[in-house]
Every structure is written in C-alpha cells, then in structure tokens.
Amino acid sequence: MQQLAVKVKPNSKQVTLAWNGEKLAVRLTASPQDGKANRQLVEVLAKEFGLAKRQVVIAKGHTSSNKLLQLDVSQAQLDQHLAGLDQLPEQTKLLPL
C-alpha cells in the first residue's frame, strides 16, 4: 500500500483533481457533514485509480481537510498516475459526477 497526501475542499461546484508534486488537491461536491465528503473522496479516488473502494483507506485526517490516504497500488502505478495528472492543463482533471 502506498501513502498519498490529500487536501480536500468539500462543497465545490465540480469534482476535480490537481497534483502539485507533493499533495493531491481534491474538490468534492459533497458536504463534510456525517462523513459524506470522506465517502465521496474514497469513491472518487477508487474510480480514478481503478480500485475497489476497500483498497482506498483514509489513514489520518478523518475530520480534517488534510488527509493521508493509503492506496493498494504499487509505487510505480501511483507515480505513473500522478504524472498523468501533471500533463493536464493547469494540472487539473475534471471528473464527471
């Protein structure tokens, strides 16, 4: 399992991902109440990385916007995927809901 630092912004108009080289910024449409944003974060990243939801775990930061996630991928897979985000204009990827 690989660790990934994530900064979450709930209550956004669109779901987006942006990689700055150190941390993945994720904008979510869900509100932070009752763990809705955490659930959406796990769903979005599982879909993005082609994983089952159980393969994406919030290790730290359940009640914080700064989170540490564990993904059941190899370091090479993680690096390759994040490098793909770097190729996008303004390092942002819009995701359909």
Image (spheres, rainbow, N blue to C red):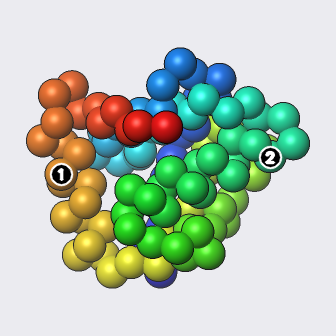
User: In percent of the image, x 41 and y 45: which residue is there?
Assistant: 23
Q: Amino acid at mark 2?
A: Gly
* Secondary element at image label 2: helix
Label annotation for residue 35: 2
Would residue 74 appear left or right of 90 to someone viewing this image? right
Snapshot quadrant of residue 66 = top right
Position of residue 40 relative to residue 97, above or below, is: below
Which residue corresponds to mark 1?
A: 84
Would residue 9 appear left or right of 24 to someone viewing this image? right
Q: In the orientation shown, which residue stands out farthest toward the left?
A: 87
What crowding class fits label 1: few (fewer than 14 Cα within 10 Å), some (14-19), or many (20 or more)?
few
Q: Position of residue 65 (x, y in %)?
A: 65, 37
Q: Position of residue 8 (x, y in %)?
A: 57, 37
Q: Position of residue 48 (x, y in %)?
A: 38, 56
CB contact under 8 Å: marks 1 and 2: no
Distance from Cα at disc 1 to Cα at disc 2: 29 Å
> Closer to the N terminus: mark 1 or mark 2?
2
Would residue 15 appear left or right of 61 to someone viewing this image? left
Q: Amino acid at mark 1?
A: Gly
Q: In the orientation shown, which residue stands out farthest toward the top?
A: 13
Residue 70 visible, this angle: no
User: In percent of the image, x 75 and y 52: which residue is there?
Assistant: 62
Who is closer to the viewer here, 64 or 44? 44
